[in-house]
Amino acid sequence: MARTHVILGDEIVDAIDQLVGQRGRSRFLEEAAREKLERLELEQALASTAGILKSKDYPEFEDQASINEWVRAQRRTEEAS
């Protein structure tokens, strides 16, 4: 575990302390940073894979009606198993 020095505005520190208390501040900030990192990683993954599926290759996803029919067909297949 590493220690670091972080400068936060008084209003942020006060809001955190009201929610979790001074003794819970570090854990709260660690969890908040972890959540933000996960969100950024997800955004990066979505951006890097955007457009990899071409509509010509997946006509079943062309429009909402096609998607609905595809889902119904999948459900029928599952029920028959």
Image: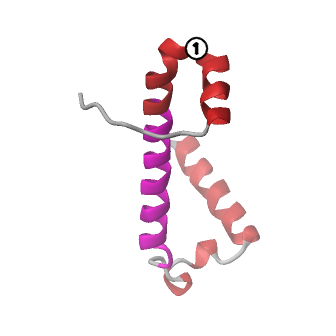
Is residue 39 toward the left or the right of residue 66 in the image? Answer: left
Residue under circle 1? 21
**In which quarter of the view is residue 26 placed?**
top left
- Colour scheme of the rendered structure: secondary structure
Question: At 43% from the left edge and 39% from the top edge, which residue is drawn?
Answer: 6
Q: Residues within 10 Å of mark 1 (few under 14, many from 20)?
A: some
Overall secondary structure of the magenta stretch? Answer: helix
Q: Quadrant of residue 34?
A: top left
35 in magenta: yes
List x then y, in percent, for residue 50. 49, 74
**Residue 42 on the magenta span:** yes
Q: Give residue 72's position: percent from left, percent from top.
A: 67, 55
Q: Farthest bottom residue? A: 56
Residue found at the far left of this picture: 1
Residue at left offset 44%, top offset 77%: 52
Foreground pick, 66 / 31: 31
Image spot of residue 61 (x, y percent): 62, 72
Residue 56, x across and y down, in percent:
53, 87
The vertical placement of 6 against 41, above or below, is above
**Taking 38 as reference, is 71 above or below it?**
below
Q: Secondary structure at mark 1?
A: loop
Q: Is residue 42 shown left or right of residue 18?
A: left
In the rendered image, the vertical position of residue 60 relative to residue 13, given as above or below: below
Three-letter amino acid code at the position of disc 1:
Gly
Q: What segment is highlighted magenta in the picture? A: 31-51
Residue shown at 74% from the left, 69% from the top: 64
* Observer-nearest of 75 and 48: 48
Residue lying at the far right in this picture: please name it: 65
